[in-house]
Amino acid sequence: MYASEQAWREVDAYFVDTLVPEDEALVHARQSGGATTMPQAEVAANQGKLLALLCGMSGARRVLEFGTLAGYSTIWLARAVGRDGHVTTLELEPQNAAVAADNLRRAGVAERVDIRTGPALKSAEQLVEAGTEPYDFVFIDADKPSNPAYLKASLALTRPGSVIVIDNVVRNGAVTDPDSDDDRVRGVRTVLADIAADDRLEATALQTVGAKGWDGFTVVRRVR
Ligand code: SAM
């Protein structure tokens, strides 16, 4: 028996009400998604809190994010790394970066976040060329066809022990179709195959239902 999407939403609302209070800055960041190029594409509150918990559990102080949007997930990550931590977040659209910058100021974390505007792959390459200190935690949540390239860039910017989380790997179940002509599905399938073939990485993937529909994420640990 399948519960309805309405039930998924009600359970998410219950969990968020019970365990994941959002302050004014987070509420504003979520709502300001309407002023971006991809309204409502931010993670759900309980997913943002999960990212923060994973950062905390892994002791992450330096975070790299692909896909900023309005900075909703960025706020969760920036708060998780603490006052001495740092988040670099990569965003294609200047409009979204401007909305995010305002939200990060509101949340009191602007000084620990570097928003780099432009194609994320190019920004990541610049970070590699600059010999940037390795990141402890990476959140990949930008254009899905580029996931394999973002994983490769992440491996050039992390160290053994770093954690990589990739969002939206289920896509309403479409991920199981090996013949999909959807570039986003192909991006997910290729990155999962790349992870599986890389003996530096151990990983799992989980599917989720809730306020964001039926989707899921991959959690990767770099062991070498
Ligand atoms: N992580 C955000 C959150 O949860 O609050 C949501 C990110 S949204 C799903 C994806 C973002 O990736 C959008 O803001 C989009 O403009 C950005 N994006 C798309 N293609 C990109 C690219 N090539 N380089 C950098 N950012 C890109």
Image (cartoon, rainbow, N blue to C red):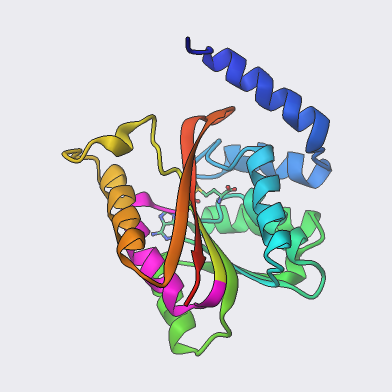
Q: What residue is at 64 percent from the left and 52 percent from the top?
A: 51
Q: Position of residue 53 (x, y in %)?
A: 71, 53
Query: Which of these two is toward me, 67 or 219?
Result: 219
**Numbered circles on residues, count:** 0
Residue farthest along the top direction in this orientation: 1
Q: Give the side of residue 108 with respect to residue 47, left or right.
A: right
Query: Which of these two is toward me, 90 or 141?
Result: 141
Q: What residue is at 36 percent from the left and 57 percent from the top?
A: 147
158, above or below 143, in the image = below
Q: What residue is at 75 percent from the left and 44 percent from the top?
A: 26
Magenta region? 142-161
Q: Give the side of residue 83 with respect to residue 99, left or right.
A: right
Q: What residue is at 72 percent from the left and 68 percent from the top?
A: 59
45, above or below 96, in the image = above
| Magenta stretch, main secondary structure class | helix
51, above or below 214, in the image = below
Residue 43 occupies quadrant: top right
State whether residue 92 appears in this view. no
Q: Position of residue 4 (x, y in %)?
A: 53, 12
State whether residue 163 appears in this view. yes
Q: Position of residue 40 (x, y in %)?
A: 55, 36
Q: Is residue 157 magenta?
A: yes
101, above or below 214, in the image = below
Q: Is residue 153 magenta?
A: yes
Residue 31 occupies quadrant: top right
Q: Position of residue 80 (x, y in %)?
A: 75, 60
